[in-house]
Image (cartoon, rainbow, N blue to C red):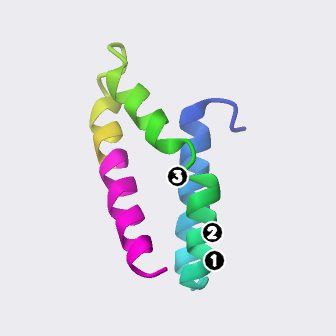
Amino acid sequence: DTREPEDQAAAVFEVFAVLILVSFSLSQQQVFFKAHMQTWLGTFFSDLGGARSADFYQPVARFGAAFLKLESAYLSMHS
């Protein structure tokens, strides 16, 4: 069940990990990243990091935002 944004994010990251683990091409990874991750996860992590009631998730938000930045740069170098 992926009705909560946190669950959606976790599911998308799991799929991305599988794409990498089963050796999908870099271009296929780029397509997935741009279509299913880059479009909304930056805003999600920003919102999550700013939520006062989400103390536990603030480090997760910082890590997630850093990952998106790094992965975006990596994929851009190989396009």
Q: Is residue 72 magenta?
A: yes
Q: Is residue 59 left or right of residue 28?
A: left
Q: Which residue is mark 2?
A: 31
- What segment is highlighted magenta in the picture? 64-79
Q: Depth check: 42 or 76 in front?
A: 76
Question: Mark 3: which secondary structure?
Answer: loop
Residue at the image point whose x is 40% and y is 54% from the top: 68
Q: Nearer the viewer, residue 71 or 60?
A: 71
| Quarter in which the N terminus is drawn | top right
Q: SS for tag 1? A: helix
Query: Pointer 2: residues within 10 angstroms few (<14), some, or many (20+)?
Result: few
Q: Are marks 2 and 1 in contact (CB under 8 Å)?
A: yes
Residue at (49% x, 80% y) in the render: 79
Dot 3 and dot 1 residues touching (CB under 8 Å)? no
The residue depicted at 61 percent of the width and 50 percent of the height is 11
Residue that mark 3 sits on: 38
Q: Is residue 39 above or below residue 35?
A: above
Q: Quadrant of residue 67?
A: bottom left
Query: Any mark on residue 28, and which?
Result: 1
Ranked by sequence position, the earlier of labels 3 and 1 is 1
